[in-house]
Image (cartoon, rainbow, N blue to C red):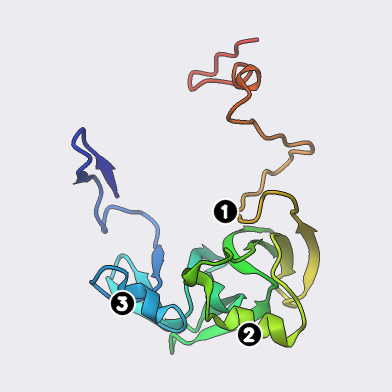
């Protein structure tokens, strides 16, 4: 983990070995040249175990959102629209469910996973030529933005929410246990911003 100094230079703050829990990161490709990952979007993605520095899964398409839950590593094989996990022995990705959008962001609640779906950006090469587009075309479907709730026991989609309007992409998903009426604070509504708790829990009304 790093932070920026006044000259916008990365300063290392915490290296692997200083974390109490195991965690992994995903990459879209194994390359050390500018934009080298773009040519590997279809099947060049991988998962890296940070503690061991080992690549534990390969042949992924733009993988995203690795999460450890119930003693298993789960992730989104976004370029193929799949939620699943890499086999701990072979590293081969095991899809659990195909979802109708570009997957990004997920969270778990009890025996369910909630995944975020986005619409691929139009006229952008990053999202062109992916298996996701081919599979949607085969099904006569189009990608949508929203949420899907998947049962971890059966792999079935038990609920979904479609987001329409100007919002076409989601970046992460979170569960708020016990909250019945969550709200969103607008960035341009100064009156709303004045009525929130600050870091020291003082509230201005």
Furthest toward the front, the residue is: 123
Query: Where is mark 3, residue-wise?
Result: 30
Task: Describe the element under mark 3 as helix, strand or loop.
Answer: loop
Q: Quadrant of residue 4?
A: top left
| Vertical order, 8 against 105 (above or below) | above
Tell me residue 103's x, y (percent).
60, 67
Q: Nearer the viewer, mark 3 or mark 2?
A: 2
Task: Describe the element under mark 2 as helix, strand or loop.
Answer: helix
Task: Describe the element under mark 1 as helix, strand or loop.
Answer: loop
Q: Earlier in the sequence, mark 3 or mark 1?
A: 3
Query: Where is mark 1, residue-wise?
Result: 172
Q: Which quadrant holds the C terminus?
A: top right
Tell me residue 127's x, y (percent).
52, 71
Q: Earlier in the sequence, mark 1 or mark 2?
A: 2
Query: Where is mark 2, residue-wise?
Result: 134
Tell me residue 186's x, y (percent).
63, 31
Q: Earlier in the sequence, mark 3 or mark 2?
A: 3
**Label 3: few (<14), some or many (≥20) within 10 Å?**
few
- The residue lying toward the viewer, choosing from 119 and 172, is 119
* Residue at x 60% of width, y 21% of height: 193
Q: Is residue 77 among the parts visible in the rendering?
A: no
* Residue at x 65% of width, y 80% of height: 96
């Amino acid at each position: 983990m790093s932070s920026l100094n006044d000259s916008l230079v990365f300063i290392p703050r915490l290296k692997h070995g200083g974390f109490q829990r195991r965690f992994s990161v995903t990459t879209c490709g194994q390359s050390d040249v500018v934009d080298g990952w773009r040519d590997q979007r279809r099947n060049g993605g991988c998962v890296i175990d940070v503690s061991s520095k080992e690549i534990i899964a390969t042949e992924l398409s733009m993988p995203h959102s690795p999460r450890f839950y119930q003693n298993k590593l789960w992730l989104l094989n976004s370029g193929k629209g799949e939620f699943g996990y890499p086999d701990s022995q072979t590293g081969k990705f095991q899809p659990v469910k195909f979802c109708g959008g570009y997957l990004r962001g997920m969270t778990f609640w009890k025996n369910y996973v909630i995944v975020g779906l986005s619409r691929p950006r139009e006229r952008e090469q990053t999202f062109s030529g992916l298996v996701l587009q081919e599979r949607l075309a085969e099904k006569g479907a189009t990608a949508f933005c929203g949420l899907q709730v998947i049962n971890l026991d059966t792999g079935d989609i038990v609920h979904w929410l479609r987001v329409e309007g100007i919002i076409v992409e989601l970046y992460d998903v979170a569960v708020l246990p016990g909250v019945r009426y969550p709200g969103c604070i607008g960035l341009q509504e100064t009156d709303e911003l004045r009525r929130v708790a600050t870091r020291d829990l003082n509230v201005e009304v």
